[in-house]
Image (cartoon, helix red, strand yellow):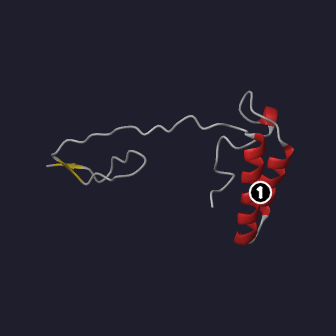
């Protein structure tokens, strides 16, 4: 299950979100309920309701994904393959 609080474009709280963002009180109520839920099964049910509501109201449309290209010289060792650039553990041989 994706956490609705970690999805940056999902908030639908109008002026409190990004400029021009939609206002949908139902999505916001469901997001708060998901945050307060103590049981993982309940969170999954709420997340399904959030998804249904998002398909009804379309609060945002993903337009693509950005994956930066990274190249390393052959004489480097210890490079950590991760979604961010980590410079520790790298050595030149």
Q: In this view, does 90 lie to the left or right of 7?
A: left
| 50 and 33: which is toward the camera | 50
Where residue 77 appears, x then y in whole percent? 21, 52
- Residue 50, horizontal then vertical, whole percent: 75, 53
Residue 38 vertical placement versus 58 (above, below): below
- Comparing 82 with 43, the one in front is 43
The image quarter containing residue 19 is top right
Q: In which quarter of the view is residue 22 placed? A: top right
Whether residue 11 is visible, yes or no, is yes
Left or right? Give the position of 50 relative to 8: right
Q: Nearer the viewer, residue 19 or 58?
A: 58
**What is the tally of numbered marks visible in this picture?**
1
Considering every residue shown, the one lying at the far front of the view is: 56
Q: How far across and down, in percent of the image, does residue 91 sit?
A: 21, 50
Q: Which residue is drawn at 43% across and 48% down?
A: 83
Q: Residues within 10 Å of mark 1 (few under 14, many from 20)?
A: some
**Location of mark 1 (residue):** 49
> Where's residue 31, x and y in %?
77, 53
Identity of the residue drawn at 69% across and 53% down: 4
Label 1 element class: helix
Residue that protrudes farthest toward the top in the picture: 20
**Residue ID at (52%, 36%):** 64
Figure quadrant of the N terminus: bottom right
Task: Note whether residue 35 is visible.
Answer: no
């Amino acid at each position: 299950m994706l956490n609705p609080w970690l999805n940056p474009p999902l908030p639908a709280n109008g002026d409190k979100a990004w400029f021009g963002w939609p206002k949908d009180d139902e999505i916001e109520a469901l997001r708060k309920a998901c945050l307060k839920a103590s049981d993982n099964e309940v969170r999954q049910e709420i997340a399904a309701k959030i998804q249904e509501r998002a398909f009804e109201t379309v609060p945002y449309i993903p337009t693509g994904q950005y994956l930066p290209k990274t190249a390393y010289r052959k004489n480097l060792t210890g490079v950590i393959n991760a979604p961010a650039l980590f410079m520790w553990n790298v050595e030149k041989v």
